[in-house]
Image: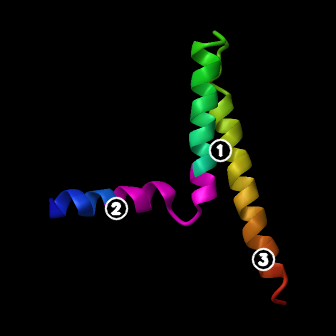
Amino acid sequence: MKHVKAFGAFACDFVIGDDWRVALLVVAGLIVTALLAHAGGIPAWWVLPVVAFAALGWSVHRATASRGNRR
């Protein structure tokens, strides 16, 4: 049981990483992609890359904006 707990802690840290908001946006992007592909019948391969790049830009903006106040 100890190994299962350790693997769960590793997986949580690996997936969520430094920013839980980015992980949440990626999960939301996966859900939107699945809904568009299955319910709407729309080719939705493009949704996840758009969400990932937007999450990356938002994360970098937040990190650099907080550093700019320390000058």
Residues tagged 1 and 3 counted as in contact (Cβ below 8 A) = no
Residue 54 % position (x, y):
74, 47
Q: Which residue is mark 3?
A: 66
Tally the numbered discs.
Answer: 3
Measuring 21% from the left and 56% from the top, which residue is drawn there? 4
Pointer 2 or 1: first along the chain: 2
Residue 26 % position (x, y):
59, 44
What element does badge 1 sit on?
helix
Pointer 1 or 3: first along the chain: 1
The magenta region covers 9-23
Q: Quadrant of the C terminus?
A: bottom right
What element does badge 2 sit on?
helix
Kind of residue at badge 2: Phe
Measuring 65% from the left and 37% from the top, which residue is drawn there? 49
Mark 1 vs mark 3, CA separation in Å? 21 Å
The kind of secondary structure the magenta stretch mainly shows is helix
Pointer 2 or 3: first along the chain: 2
Q: Which residue is mark 2?
A: 10
Residue 51 % position (x, y):
69, 40
The one of 63 and 12 positioned closer to us in this rendering: 12
Instruction: Give the vertical position of 15 relative to 19 (above or below).
Output: above
* Residue 1 picture quarter: bottom left
Q: Residues within 10 Å of mark 1 (few under 14, many from 20)?
A: some
Q: Which residue is mark 1?
A: 52
Q: Is residue 22 magenta?
A: yes
Residue lying at the far front in this picture: please name it: 1
Give left or right: position of 19 versus 15.
Answer: right
* Residue 41 picture quarter: top right
The one of 55 and 21 positioned closer to us in this rendering: 21
Q: Is residue 7 magenta?
A: no
Residues tagged 2 and 3 counted as in contact (Cβ below 8 A) = no
